[in-house]
Amino acid sequence: QVQFVESGGGLVHPGESLRLSCAASGRFFSISTMGWYRQAPGQQRELVAIIRSESNKNYTDSVKGRFIISRDNAKNTVTLIMNRLKPEDTAVYYCNTDWGARDNKYWGQGTRVTVSS
């Protein structure tokens, strides 16, 4: 069974930081590429960051230098540290495997991030 539970979102001011966490269930975790995705109001869901290992990560251009993705295979968790948040980062954030996202399956409820002054 594949399930994700995201947490850590909230309302913050521009320039502030948040730490999002994703707890995954299932035996797939350690062998899967994990990603954080987001969906802003009226927009399609987009990939924010992806991690294969601590030495193999990628970020969408708009968050490079501000967000950090990491994973703990022992705990089946993936974390997204978001620094210097901007209003355009406002969205519901989700985690998923790359194959789950490709097949549009296994999405959790997400965690809402609102950046507003």
Image (cartoon, grey):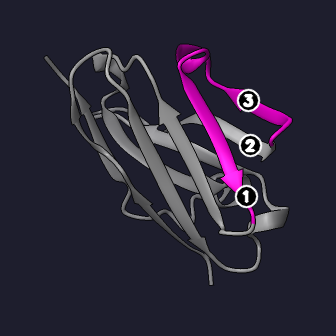
For marks 3 and 1, give the one nearer the viewer. Answer: 3
User: Which residue is disc 2 drawn over?
Assistant: 51
Mark 2 or mark 3, earlier in chain: 2
Q: Secondary structure at mark 3?
A: strand
The quarter of the picture where residue 101 lies is bottom right
> Mark 2 to mark 3: distance in Å?
7 Å
User: Which residue is disc 1 drawn over?
Assistant: 99
Q: Quadrant of the C terminus?
A: top left
The quarter of the picture where residue 30 lies is bottom right
Q: Secondary structure at mark 1?
A: helix
In the displayed structure image, the side of residue 107 where residue 75 appears, left or right: right
Q: What's drawn in magenta, residue-wise?
A: 54-73
Q: Hey, what amino acid is under mark 2? A: Ile
The quarter of the picture where residue 17 lies is top left
For marks 2 and 1, give the one nearer the viewer. Answer: 2
User: Are there few (<14), some (14-19), or many (20+) residues within 10 Å of tag 2?
Assistant: many
Mark 3 or mark 1, earlier in chain: 3
Whole-percent x and y of residue 53?
83, 45
> Mark 2 to mark 1: distance in Å?
13 Å
Q: Residue at x 32, y 46 (%)?
A: 9
User: Which residue is disc 3 drawn over?
Assistant: 58
Residue 70 located within the stretch drawn in magenta: yes
Q: Residue at x 61, y 17 (%)?
A: 64
